[in-house]
Amino acid sequence: MTTKGQWASACLGAMAAALAVATPAMASEAGGGVYPNGAEGMLAGALPPKGLYYLGYLQYYEAGRFNDGDGNSGLLPDFKVKAEAVVTRVVWVTDKKFLGADYAMHVVVPVVNVDARIAGMSGNRSGVSDVTIDPIILGWHFRNGWHVITGLDINLPVGSYDRASIANFSRHYWNVEPIVAFAYYKKNLRLDVKMMYDINFKNTDAQINGFNPTGAGYRSGNEFHADYAASYAISPKVQLGFSGYYYKQTTGDHVDNAAAQLGIDAMHGFKGEAFAGGPSVRLGLGKVHLLTTWQHEFFANYRPQGDKFWIKAIIPIK
């Protein structure tokens, strides 16, 4: 009788042996996610005053390992991924109130370039990825220095997608993400936490890879993740701190193929976990805020482990 461990070994062996089933870097059904962890940090927990804002993000990510469930490298052989993203986010804070909160909405449009190499196969893809909208964002401001934001992001799977590519960036499935963010600003101390929970829907045109060689319908497990920042304002225009993220997949992946599911089950549902952090700087340039961050992934289970670099600009439009 074949054991679950043998199923997992067979799955990984097929991935290394056959180029056509190499798992995509940071964009497989397992091992990736809709939200770019670490994107928010300083100023994430407080809604700005009413107005229209442009937020521009430049992100670079590089990883040279894909870890197993114990955080050891080598689950995917000869693994390397580089990803660059230019993200446009437009936030409109209206003059309306609801339940005592300011009412806002936003839209996020990323343009991504991915270079991937796995098991001797390489790929590159560029294009517009999935769009995120949130028509109802509520923000409260309290006199004791606390701020609270709630929202419900919706991922629209409209990005460029090739189910056979190892360098995909679109998730190609619907996703909803409840959000609660907190901030505490008192004198020069700044604390921000943005917590999210991803509820993923099935990808009926799933990627063909070593975990799912037939491309059967695939539902990624749900995910909890939180961006955080702790900082100190050394002057009104300069803020120094430490920011990053924690990620934990809470439910296992499910594939509509019994043999493939045995391999996923042998790896405990392929439930990922990661923690990252690093130095952050905010510069005030008139009404514009410029933020830079380096985030090192200190550990990662069933995910790539590497480093992220962010540059973020917050620009009032009107």
Image (tube, grey):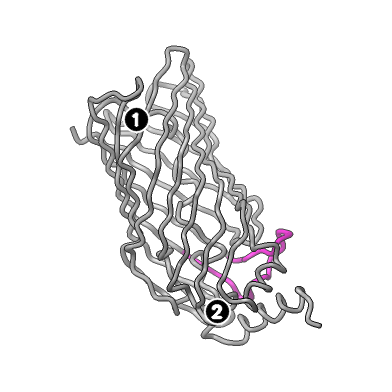
The tally of labels here is 2
Q: Residue furthest left?
A: 318
In the picture shown, does residue 35 fall above or below 106? below
Q: Residue furthest top?
A: 143
**Left or right: 191 as drawn, with respect to 143:** right
User: Circle 2 sits on which residue?
Assistant: 22
**Left or right: 128 as drawn, with respect to 247:** left
Q: Is residue 221 magenta?
A: no
Q: Quadrant of residue 162?
A: bottom left
Residue at (56%, 76%) from the top-left corner? Answer: 212
Callout 1: few (<14), some (14-19), or many (20+) C-alpha neighbours within 10 Å?
some
Callout 2: few (<14), some (14-19), or many (20+) C-alpha neighbours within 10 Å?
many
Q: Position of residue 135 (x, y in %)?
A: 30, 41
For the residue pair 213 and 80, the one nearer the viewer reads as 213
For the residue pair 180 and 68, the one nearer the viewer reads as 180
In the picture shown, does residue 266 fall above or below 19? above
Residue kind at label 1, given as amino acid type:
Gly
Residue kind at label 2, given as amino acid type:
Ala
Q: Position of residue 27 (x, y in %)?
A: 48, 66
Q: Position of residue 222 (x, y in %)?
A: 55, 53
* Quadrant showing the N terminus: bottom right
Residue 284: numbered disc: 1
For the residue pair 145 and 107, the one nearer the viewer reads as 107
For the residue pair 72 and 259, the one nearer the viewer reads as 259
Please report the bounds of the magenta region as a residue range: 64-82
Using the numbered discs, state the Cα–Cα distance from disc 1 to disc 2 in whole angstroms. Answer: 45 Å
Q: Secondary structure at mark 2?
A: loop
Q: Main secondary structure of the magenta part?
A: loop
In the picture shown, does residue 193 fall above or below 123? above
**Left or right: 202 as drawn, with respect to 153:** right
Residue at (27%, 31%) from the top-left corner? Answer: 93
- Disc nearest the viewer among 1 and 2: 2
